[in-house]
Image (cartoon, helix red, strand yellow):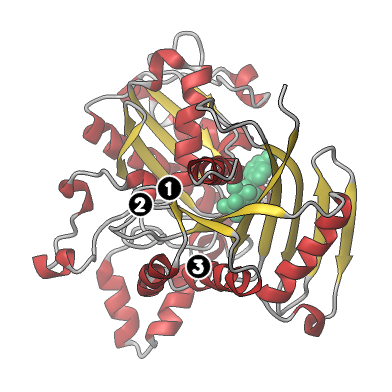
Amino acid sequence: MATLHPVILVVNAGSSSVKVSVYMVPDSAHDNADIQPALAAHGQIEGIGVAPRLVARMADGRTVADESFPVEQIADHDAAFRLIRLTLSIGLRDTPPVAIGHRVVHGGADFSDAVRIDDAVIDKLEALVPLAPLHQPHNLTAIRAIRRAVPDLLQVACFDTAFHAGHDPLAQLMALPYEYYERGIRRYGFHGLSYAYIARQLGQVAPDVADGRVIVAHLGNGASLCAMRGGKSVESTMGLTALDGMPMGTRCGSIDPGAVLWLAAQGMSADEIQSMLYGQSGLKGISGISSDMRALLASDALRARLAVDFYAYRAAQEIGKLAVTLGGLDALVFTAGIGANSPQVRARICAQLTGLFGIVIDDVANNANQQRVSHGNSRVPVWALQTDEEGMIALSTARILRDNGGL
Ligand code: ADP
């Protein structure tokens, strides 16, 4: 067996957090065998600029850091990244990374796969900032900071949009004047790293349906659904931005654009509307209690129930819509924080799919969060699978590293 030692870092820089995962790859991966990176450690700082908190753990569960810091000590993403690196390097006896893989939310029309980062790629990603104003700038900050510090280190961008790049123009269009489509105002779809991972997983746990018509519901803080045929994405509920489709923790999902015009006519600025649609809507907005599904499921408040009912209703509706695109349904997969872990939410969604698809949940399997949660009589099998977006980034980065002679 190959010894595990070259290190790949996976960096996920969000608006107020930086997450870094350390993967080891086999050093003999220069043949064509599939590379399987192994997670060695994970560190994250949340609350940057507000109440920074560092948590770092080795893959064996050992905690190497769990502490809060004064705001001024970790004032920005740069400082957060340096501290996580330092903390993890102690646990890993300072093995320097051979490559860094970044989660980048928007690859626009140019990128249909992970790509090695150079100045031209950075320019293209910069041009996409207006399409993902809350995520893309932080992704770029991390890329630039590392490039300044270690200019020769291989950096790879892995996109949330890339898995959807093959969509038919019908799935990309919005009925605006056509010139906007040509200018890139089109439906891209997101959560592609999660869907790519699930497509791979499904090939292993359910090879009989993996090549068929599959709908995957990624239900986390952000939420979207993807229709796949033959393991490839053909439609997504998310569009130009990560606001479209399902209602989410704090995002509104699809709403009548007339509502946005109404808010603007009331005198709200574009920034105020943006912050309402991204941060004050969805489960949080309806319930007035929390964006966290666990808190809502535990609450007796009427509006908490309304929020969960609406969430399940909209998810079921989107599944119906995607099944039209697929011309039927061979399997339904739930994933991400809510999808993989919440029997109640899965049961509520699936209860609305019995009439149309003959879906029947097996209560015992569902309540135990088993992988297959549907009953033997269910016309369409239903799965609950954990996703691993960071593992997917590590794999793409390792492949590009190998193709560049780095392994
Ligand atoms: P992100 O999109 O930030 O990666 P996650 O995929 O971790 O988020 O999903 C977070 C959501 O998952 C939260 O709403 C949380 O309440 C929910 N969640 C996690 N575990 C459970 C559970 N056991 N039951 C219900 N909801 C859960």
| Mark 3 CB lies closer than 8 A to ligand 1 | no
Residue drawn at point x = 24 percent, y = 60 percent: 186
The residue type indicated by label 3 comes to His
Which mark is in front, 3 or 1? 3
> Which quarter of the figure is the C terminus placed in?
top right
Give whichever of discs 3 and 2 has the lower sequence position. Answer: 3
Secondary structure at numbered mark 3: loop
Task: Measure the alpha-carbon separation of dots 3 and 1.
Answer: 17 Å
Residue drawn at point x = 27 percent, y = 56 percent: 187
Residue drawn at point x = 18 percent, y = 55 percent: 173
Q: Quadrant of residue 195?
A: top left
Image coordinates of residue 169 in percent, x first then y, are 16, 49
Give whichever of discs 1 and 2 has the lower sequence position. Answer: 2
The residue type indicated by label 1 comes to Ser
> Which quarter of the figure is the N terminus placed in?
top right
Count residues near mark 3 (Cα–Cα under 10 Å), then give few for <14, some for 14-19, many for 20+. some
Q: Which residue does the numbered mark 1 point to in the structure image?
A: 224
Task: Measure the alpha-carbon separation of dots 1 and 2.
Answer: 8 Å
Image coordinates of residue 45 in percent, x first then y, are 74, 64
Q: Is residue 336 above or below residue 79?
A: above
Q: Which residue does the numbered mark 2 point to in the structure image?
A: 189
Residue drawn at point x = 69 percent, y = 53 percent: 97
Q: In the rendered structure, are the residues bearing label 1 and label 2 in contact, judged by CB atoms less than 8 Å apart? A: yes
Q: Is residue 138 above or below residue 105?
A: below
In the picture, the disc for residue 389 is none
| Mark 1 CB lies closer than 8 A to ligand 1 | no
Q: Is residue 243 above or below residue 218?
A: below
Asked if residue 90 lies left or right of residue 49, the reply is: right
Q: Which residue does the numbered mark 3 point to in the structure image?
A: 135
Q: Residue furthest top?
A: 376
